[in-house]
Amino acid sequence: MAAPKGNKFWEARSSHGRSPKFESADSLWSACCEYFQWVEEHPLWEMKAFNYQGEVTQEPVAKMRAMTLTGLTLFLDITLETWRMYRQRDDLSEVVTRAEQVIYDQKFSGAAADLLNANIIARDLGLKDSHATEHSGTVETKDSTMTDVARRLAFILTKSMKENSNA
């Protein structure tokens, strides 16, 4: 049965809309710290084989779990879009920045100490070793036959052998 026309039941609510998950910067920071603590207390486990006096055993070995922004938002039960909106809010932007710095530092430190895969972490953190080559002229190519390639290769090998025999 539909509500009667002209009703004002919605005005009887004590609050309108959904209550915010985090009412203050302190409550958000506290929840972030709970995530950081959870990551530290719940490492990933890998089975490693050990050989001692000819006997091979397998033992679980704790591995560092990387903190992630996605992991944080899942832990906080919010979306990445909500996190981005928190970044824009004057009352929460400092906490968001600090939490992101903690995550960045944990990943960077873990990769530097070889506790996390450095290649994966470098890509995730946007770190790259870039080499740029600039060339302003035109590039000319020449079709080479197999004979040309064989002659060039023979020349390089002969030159290398002479240098090694003189050394």
Image (cartoon, rainbow, N blue to C red):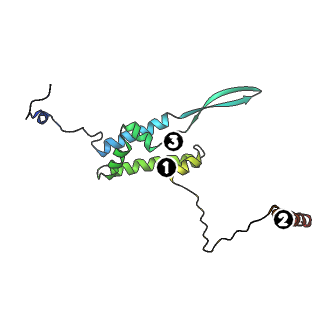
Check disc 2 and report the residue beneath it: 156
**Callout in the foreground (3, 2):** 2
- Where, by quadrant of the figure, is residue 114 drawn? top right
How packed mark 3 is, by other alpha carbons closer than 10 Å (few <14, some 14-19, many 20 or more), is many
> What is the secondary structure assignment of the residue under circle 3?
loop
Answer whether labels 3 and 2 touch (C-beta < 8 Å): no
Q: Nearer the viewer, residue 102 or 124?
A: 124
- At label 2, the amino acid type is Ile
Q: Position of residue 126 (x, y in %)?
A: 51, 54
Which of the image's four quarters has the N terminus? Answer: top left
| As drawn, 136 above or below 118 | below
As shown in the figure, which amino acid type bears the numbered disc 3? Ala
| Residue at the (64%, 28%) spot, across then down | 59
What residue would you read off at disc 1?
105
* Marked residue nearer the N-terminal end (1 or 3): 3
Q: Nearer the viewer, residue 18 or 72?
A: 18
Question: x, y percentage for residue 117?
Answer: 59, 45
Residue 111 shown left or right of residue 81 in the figure: right
Kind of residue at disc 1 = Asp
Separation (CA) of disc 1 from disc 2: 49 Å
